[in-house]
Amino acid sequence: MNNTEFVNRDDVANNKNIRNTRMVLGTSWNIKVIKDFPISFALTYQNLANRFEYFDKLPSKNEAKGYFLPNVNLAYKGLSASYSRSVNPPSFSQIIVLNNDMTPTVMVYASPYFENVIRNDFSLRYYKSFTKSKTYINASVSYGVSDNSIISDQYYNVADGTSSRQNIQASDIGSLFWNGSLSQTFLQNKTWRLAASINGYFSMSDRYARINGEENMGKNSFGNISGNITFSYKDNLTISPNYNYSRNGVEYKDDSPNFRSVNNITHNFGSSILVNNIKKFRLEGSYTLSNLVTGIDNKRGNRHLVNASVYYPVLGKGELKLSVFDLLNQRVYNNYYASGNSNGFRTSVNLRQYFMLGMVYKFLNTGDKK
């Protein structure tokens, strides 16, 4: 034990128990007055009772509150919208019963009591398939807001390296998420095929923080957008150029010595190719130019990623496969991030350049009829 004097384990253990009891009464209705316009509605009354038990470390606490929780869903052909309200007890993991000084440079103060969280969620979705034009659209967006949150109130002493923190109740927070996809086939017959698709998603959520007495509002975000074009000639040649954009980071309302906004962005440009029937051989390859962050000062660099495979038929329904992955030995994963009042850079290397000889056997291929 790292504190100044020996203590019994039970004197510092974060013993806690929360018992949640829900009583729910409600009704639901499905209504269809207008053609292609169904409506569903539900209303529940929920009594949420919480018992906080701290095993004689702190006084136990009992509380019970009632909530009316509506739920509405509307739909018209490919468009649907919904609204719902929910309630949940406070996060068990963020409850701390006793002050903790077991680490000599860190003091964690008790934070035993928090309020229930009421959340309102809104969503909108659209899906449509146009058979004649061979166009497919799918999109959805959702937004939720919680009436309160729990944040970490932190203090750092740069002079001696000590710090302290305590979880505290904070104001409401919101979150936004959307995703979508669009695909289009421009040409398709026995000889040629030309198609394109794009899809993506994006998430953003509020992030309150308090460091050294300064409170700030940040927005955590992450997302990805990718698109590709596929061109093929019979079964002999397929070429698919592609692009991928990914982003994650945090944007603070006010930049200061305690808060720095960080964005980690990666661009990938590339293409894949498949060539069949070259004197029984089949060739497959891909190239990606990856532009990514390479240091904590947000410097950027390029990586060239090359993969290739060659196939040769054996044993009737099998193929012998020789592959090389990351031919130029440049694959690496980098992440530039913010945590608390510090920025960080992490790089990791998994499996890089390697060669593999294998065999692919198609059990479902019945072979040519004779």
Image: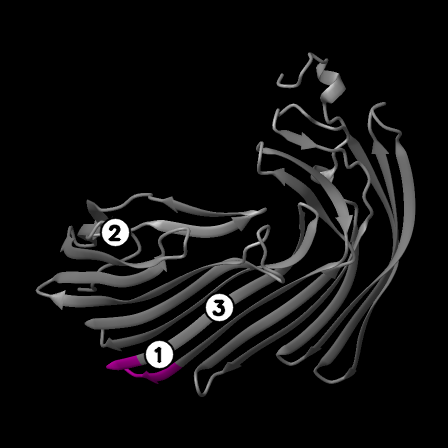
Range shown magenta: 185-193
Nearest to the observer: residue 24 or residue 202: 202
**For mark 1, what is the residue?**
195
CA neighbours of label 1 inside 10 A, class few (<14), some (14 to 19), many (20+): some
Q: Residues within 10 Å of mark 3 (few under 14, many from 20)?
A: some
- The colouring scheme, among rainbow, by chain, secondary structure or one colour, is one colour
Residue 88, x across and y down, in percent: 78, 49
Horizontally, is 32 left or right of 359 in the view? right
Q: What separation in Å lies between label 2 and label 3 (alpha carbons)?
A: 26 Å
Q: How many angstroms separate mark 1 from mark 2 (CA)?
A: 31 Å
Badge 3 marks a residue whose secondary structure is strand
Most distant residue in the left direction? 279
Magenta span includes 325:
no
Q: Quadrant of residue 58?
A: top right
- Residue shown at the point (72%, 41%) measured from the top left: 167
Q: Which residue is mark 3?
A: 200
| Gap between marks 1 and 3 measured at Cα | 17 Å
Secondary structure beneath label 1? strand
Q: Reading the chain from its start, which is encountered first: label 1 or label 3?
A: 1
Pick the quarter of the image with the C terminus.
bottom left
Say which amino acid is labelled 3.
Gly
- For marks 2 and 3 on the same chain, the one whose residue lies earlier in the sequence: 3
Q: Judge left or right: residue 79 versus residue 289.
A: right
Q: Position of residue 71 (x, y in %)?
A: 79, 65
Per the rendering, the mark at residue 178 is none
Residue 240's quadrant in the figure?
bottom left
Relative horizontal placement of residue 292, taking residue 306 as reference (left or right): right
The residue at which mark 2 appears reads as 330
Q: Nearer the viewer, residue 313 or 366?
A: 313
The vertical placement of 264 against 35, above or below, is above
Q: Residue 275's x, y, as percent? A: 18, 67
